[in-house]
């Protein structure tokens, strides 16, 4: 049976319902349907449509609130996790610091061997230490120096530029390594040199190679702006006075000054100078001279502008001439060896009877001064000795402290810090 074109689409014969249907229209339809099913014509005490709608609304609100609560919990957990990752660890340990060179060495992860060792390594010192082929920094890093052995001296390079490490003399000569600050393997700067000396500021190096003396600046692990001059056989560099190189002449011929900035050859030697220990901030050199009657080693302040002429001299206890010792960064103190022990000399009172004090075991290696004014060195047993001038003046006699991880017959090397 065919449907008339204008027939309605529902049983009531009403007009077609438009779409989409609104919420209000659905609500009216529900009320009409429920009301039509009620047999009695009296008003209802309860509204079945309203009850159904209210239940539906309550259910929707509960679902909405539950979703918001779960979202809030998730947000709090994520925020807490980010705070734990980005904030302090809470364990009280020092932050990891990666050393970097401004000259182009980017910070990179250190090798596995560079991580702090658990149960191995020396007792923490105020300065870096080299034990065998391992570098133990004052910050707690324990790092293997691949290819490095027989270390005699070491010096930090300024501006976090790494370390300069010098070997002891061998039949093949001496080696100078540069240890990069970013964990890379040490690099050989010099090999087979007859003698090597590094300036106290870590910015200059001088060495003897064949018939020549050579000096150069150190920048980014490279030797730059080198100067060279012929020198007598056996003459070796032993220190710096500013840009000038101090050269020990052979056969007890004293020490001369090579002013490499002006070119030429080393000047005339002062034959009374036995050894040098370093320079004061004002440029004067601290050394030992042969003086007095009878002649004896005496501490002296020397003027490098006048061929190391003594400006001030102090004689006292019998001093060793082994050249082991060091001057504090402020120029106030000198630690050196007497015949059987170490001595602390107050350079401000040089020449006074009270300027020299016994300072514990004899120095057996390099002396390095901390920025707090204490001297560190090792004795003949390989123990670490700390010399604090204020305590020495108060009557304390320093003693050696044993270090963990030091093999029998092995002597740690104290790394000299950069001058402030």
Image: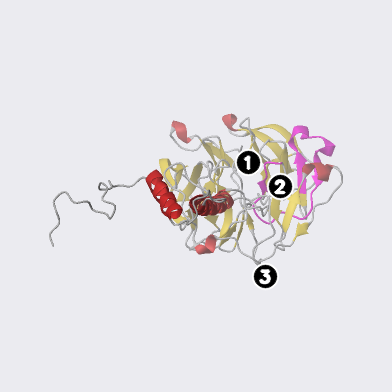
Q: Where is residue 394 drawn, in percent x and y? A: 86, 43
Residue lying furthest front in this view?
41
User: Marks 2 and 3: CB-CB under 8 Å?
Assistant: no
- The answer to whether one can see residue 164 in this image is no
Q: Which residue is mark 1?
A: 278
First in sequence: mark 3 vs mark 1: 1
Is 203 on the left or on the right of 295, as rendered?
left
Q: Which residue is mark 2?
A: 375
**Magenta span covers which residues?**
343-372
In this rendering, the answer to whether 349 lies above or below 413 is above
Query: Nearest the camera: 30 or 265?
Result: 30
Compute the Cα span from label 2 to label 3. 24 Å
Compute the Cα span from label 1 to label 2. 14 Å
- The answer to whether one can see residue 138 in this image is yes
Tag 1's secondary structure?
A: strand
Q: Where is residue 271 drawn, in percent x and y? A: 61, 40
Label drawn at residue 147: none
Density class for disc 1 (Cα within 10 Å; few <14, some 14-19, many ≥20) is many
Query: Nearest the camera: 343 or 271?
Result: 343
Task: Inspect the magenta stretch and tell me whether residue 345 lies in it.
Answer: yes
Q: Residue at x 43, y 42 (%)?
A: 103
Compute the Cα span from label 3 to label 1. 31 Å
Query: Nearest the camera: 4 or 290?
Result: 4
Tag 3's secondary structure?
A: loop
Nearest to the eye among marks 1 and 2: give it: 2
First in sequence: mark 1 vs mark 2: 1
Q: Which residue is mark 3?
A: 408
């Amino acid at each position: 049976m065919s449907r008339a074109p204008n027939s309605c689409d529902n049983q009531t014969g009403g007009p077609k319902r438009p779409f989409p249907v609104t919420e209000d229209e659905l609500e009216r339809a529900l009320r009409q349907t429920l009301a039509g099913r009620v047999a009695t014509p009296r008003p209802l005490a309860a509204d079945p449509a309203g009850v159904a709608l209210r239940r539906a609304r309550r259910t929707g609100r509960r679902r909405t609130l539950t979703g918001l609560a779960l979202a809030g919990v998730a947000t709090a957990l994520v925020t807490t996790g980010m705070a734990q990752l980005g904030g302090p660890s809470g364990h009280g340990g020092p932050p990891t610091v990666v050393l970097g060179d401004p000259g182009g060495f980017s910070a990179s992860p250190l090798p596995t061997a560079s991580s702090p060792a658990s149960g191995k390594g020396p007792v923490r010192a105020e300065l870096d230490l080299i034990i065998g082929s391992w570098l133990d920094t004052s910050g707690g890093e324990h790092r293997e120096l691949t290819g490095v052995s027989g270390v005699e001296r070491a010096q930090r390079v300024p501006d976090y530029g790494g370390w300069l490490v010098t070997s002891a003399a061998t039949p093949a000569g001496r080696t100078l390594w540069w240890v990069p600050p970013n964990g890379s393997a040490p690099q050989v700067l010099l090999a087979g040199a007859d003698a090597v000396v590094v300036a106290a500021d870590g910015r200059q190096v001088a060495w003897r190679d064949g018939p020549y003396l050579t000096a150069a600046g150190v920048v980014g692990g490279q030797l730059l702006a080198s100067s060279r001059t012929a020198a007598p056989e056996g003459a070796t560099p032993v220190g710096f006075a500013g840009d000038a190189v101090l050269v020990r002449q052979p056969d007890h011929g004293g020490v001369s000054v090579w002013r490499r900035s002006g070119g030429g050859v080393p000047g005339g030697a002062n034959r009374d100078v036995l050894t040098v220990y370093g320079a004061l901030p004002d440029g004067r050199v601290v050394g030992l001279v042969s003086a007095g009657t009878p002649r004896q080693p005496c501490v002296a302040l020397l003027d490098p502008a006048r061929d190391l002429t003594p400006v001030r001299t102090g004689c006292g206890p019998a001093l060793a001439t082994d050249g082991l010792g060091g001057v504090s960064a402020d120029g106030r103190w000198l630690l050196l060896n007497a015949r059987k022990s170490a001595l602390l000399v107050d350079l401000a009172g040089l020449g006074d009877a009270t300027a020299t004090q016994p300072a514990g075991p004899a120095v057996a290696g390099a002396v390095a001064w901390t920025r707090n004014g204490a001297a560190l060195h090792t004795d003949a047993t390989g123990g670490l000795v700390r010399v604090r001038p204020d305590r020495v003046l108060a009557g304390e006699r320093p003693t050696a402290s044993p270090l963990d991880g030091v093999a029998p017959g092995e002597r740690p090397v104290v790394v000299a810090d950069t001058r402030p």
